Image: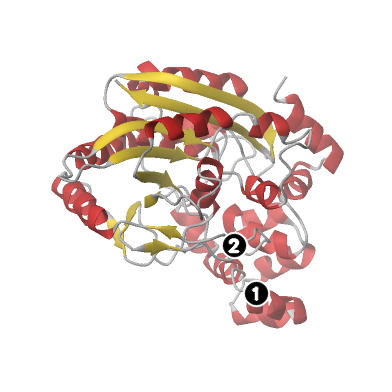
Amino acid sequence: MKQESQPESPIPGTYMFDGKAAMKGYALNKMCYSFNQAANRAAFLRDEDAYCGQYGLSAEQREAVRERNVIRMIKAGGNIYYLAKLAGLLGLNVQDVGAQQTGMTLEAFNAKLRAAGD
Amino acid sequence: MARIVGGLTTSHIPAIGNAIARELFEEPYWKPFFAGYPPVLAWLDKVKPDLAVVTYNDHGLNFFLDKLPTFSVGAAAEYRHADEGWGLPVIQPFQGDAEFSWHLINSLVADEFDIATCQEMLVDHGFTVPMSLCWPEYEKFPIKTIPICINTVQHPLPTPARCYKFGQAIGRAIESYEKDLKVVVIGTGGMSHQLDGERAGFINKEFDLMCMEKIVDEPESLTRYSIHELVRLAGAQGAEFILWLAMRGALGNKVRKIYSNYHIPISNTAAGVLVLEKE
């Protein structure tokens, strides 16, 4: 049993979506949550800057979205479940997102997943 | 009195919903995954449950960060799927059993689990994919369902030990219901996977197989992990294993394994399915 007093050591390449991240990422996540509605997806595609502005994204969050940079969005407080809705809207699936975050080609990322079953 | 006929667990990866919609059952990528389900259907056909109590997690369809309950229980006559934003086809609604829901809610709160209650609750792939896998002809042969949502979106997540105890309370609630109902408890999600960060694509076959073995006869050994340890061993989203532990808690001490299957990968995830009968 883990003792409460022991600090948890960080897990490399892993961002815990905790209260701090949830506060930091609120605007970005709220925008992504809005993409459950088709009309909102269309509005984003029509005028991305205006749509991001409407949700009050921080400069860092707007830059990350502009760059389609998922790690940067996560560091800016994005939660992967909400970001997946933005990724989907941009035509990226979770393997594309995985490849981008790990700096691998899509082929190499898929091969890594398959190899985990060996 | 109501009686628990058994429990099952299954992964709930969204890609499965797409594969079902496109009928990719025989494709080489999908065949070893779907081959895991005929024995599950055969078991369900044998035990013929009247009601499915399903522990799942919402991924940003029904709940947002404005109000995010740790445990929430459906109390509706019907549960609807809806557009999740990235193209999963919307499927038919599911029948609820509000009378049972309120019994469950009363019993859980009396048992010191202060849950949120939902008279309207959209269910996402975390709920719909397992239902489609287990009741492929739902429209023809519907079963009543009670969705129970557990937060896996925002830390702190409830601990494995807490989810196991929550499951035990669900079990007590089911078995104190006066009507003669046969109930199956379904735990969804998992197994190991991580979608976010430079560690994306993390899968841990050894840990998953250990969990699938221990959850049968030694579930309490798995409740000793912290969420942090679970994230380390099963990946950021592999922490969904807490939903399996809730199912297992509901079944009581002695169970018998009827069937299991494990396959890597489906999408970014190790997919597991397990059928347990209560002894």
At horizontal 13% and vertical 48% (from top left) the residue drawn is: B110
Residue A22 got which mark? Answer: none
Q: Residue furthest front?
A: B140
Image height of A85 relative to A109, above or below: below
- Letter of the chain that mark 2 sits on in the rendering: B
Q: Secondary structure at mark 1?
A: helix
| Chain of the residue on which disc 1 is drawn | A
Q: Is residue B150 above or below residue A5?
A: below
Residue B182 at least partly seen: yes
Q: Which mark is residue B90?
A: 2
Three-letter amino acid code at the position of disc 1: Ala
Q: Kindly tell me whether residue A77 is visible in this rendering.
A: no
Tell me how far mark 1 sits from mark 2, CA to CA: 13 Å
Circles 1 and 2, Cβ within 8 Å, touching? The answer is: no
Residue A50, compared with residue B279, is above or below; it is below
Tell which of B97 and B274 is nearer to you.
Answer: B97
Are labels 1 and 2 assigned to the same chain? Answer: no
Give x and y (percent) for residue B200: 68, 40
Q: Mark 1 or 2, which is nearer the eye?
A: 2
All told, the count of numbered labels is: 2
Q: Nearer the viewer, residue B162 or B121?
A: B121
| Image side of residue B169 versus residue B143, left or right | left
Question: What colouring does the structure picture have?
Answer: secondary structure
Quickly name the residue at label 1. A38
Q: Residues within 10 Å of mark 1 (few under 14, many from 20)?
A: some
Crowd band around label 2 with a 10 angstrom C-alpha radius: few (<14), some (14–19), many (20+): some
State the residue in front, B180 or A76: B180
Q: Quadrant of the C terminus of chain B?
A: top left
Q: Amino acid at mark 2?
A: Val
Q: Residue at x 49, y 37 (%)?
A: B239
